Amino acid sequence: MNPEQEVVLGYLDETENVLECDDDFPSFAAGLPIFLHDESSFNEIKCTICKNTMKFLLQIYAPLSFPHAFHRVLYVFMCLTCTRNPQGIRVFRMQSKQLPQQLKPSKNQDYLISKQPPFAISTETISIKENNEKLKQIQLSDDEDNQQIQQIQYNKEEFDELQDFEKEAKDNVDKSFLIYQHFVMEYYNHILRYCFHSKTTPMWFSDKKQVTPNETCKICKKQKQFEFQINNSISSFYKEIYLLDWGALYVYSCPFSCQTNEALVEETVYIQFDDLEGEAVDTQNIQPQLSKPQKQNHKKNEQQEQFQSKNKQEDSFESDDW
């Protein structure tokens, strides 16, 4: 791929064997990790807060053109006890000039996040141009909605109420969330967005609490750059993480993937939490493929319908005009 012109989206697909993939090394979620180096060369991955063994969320094969990182894998682990703490997520990279002779899953059963079988990660590549066109479509859609509202005739009382409602809605609109929600639905249930380039920016979950990365590589001292993000749509595949209240995870890595003497090199991950209040969910009866952005959109629609019903008069407009 050309990271300056393309973005790779990742989807979870059912598979009987994660090793049956087109790449030299598998990318998948859950199950047991397949490490690029022998496990005897590093310590068990534990939470820095509670010291419990962390759960394996996913790994992606992300080779670079550098000779020392010709084969490169990123591993994401999480602690189910410390989910509200940013340190409850850890991301590591492993790299090598050559692949191991045999690919074997870890024997550490404590890494299992779920009893469900793992999902292979399939990919779709979209151009930056296509990405930007989608953003313009969202803006045009908002403009058309505003024009339709302006064409409707209201009496003075209705007009004043509408003006107040529009002002409040405009002040509270979360543009980043609208874009995030649009992309998750447009490219339905993609869980991963990858583009390792200095000019690439994340697709933020919300306008709130966006971070300005300042982490640097300990070796080259260069500022780490955005590499990929994991969307909360992944939580709809595993009931063990369905109720987690983060919106997205953002991983920043050394731009040169510097070589060290350590088999596992930890990179930086930021969490953007979802502060929206959600409904109570019975985790024993979770329907698959239901993403949180869908739930949030449904909740916003219900709130709009309640407002319209409260203010409905004989000549009021239909709810579809909102």
Image (cartoon, rainbow, N blue to C red):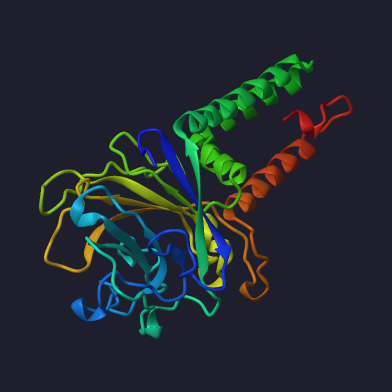
- Image point (26%, 55%), residue name: 70
Q: Quadrant of the C terminus?
A: top right
Q: Which x, y percent locates residue 276?
A: 53, 51
Q: Which x, y percent locates residue 4?
A: 35, 34
Most extreme residue toward the front is 101
- Give the side of residue 85 with respect to residue 243, left or right: left
Front residue of this view, candidates 266 and 40 = 40
Question: Residue 89 falls in which quadrant of the image?
Answer: bottom left
Front residue of this view, candidates 48 and 189 = 189
- Give the side of residue 220 with respect to residue 254, left or right: left
- Image point (22%, 60%), residue name: 97
- Compared to 23, does 118 lie above or below? below
- Give the side of residue 217 with respect to residue 24, left or right: left
- Image point (40%, 84%), residue name: 109
Most extreme residue toward the right is 314
Q: Which x, y percent locates residue 18?
A: 48, 70
Q: Which x, y percent locates residue 46?
A: 28, 76
- Compared to 1, does 71 lie above or below? below
Front residue of this view, candidates 208 and 183 = 183
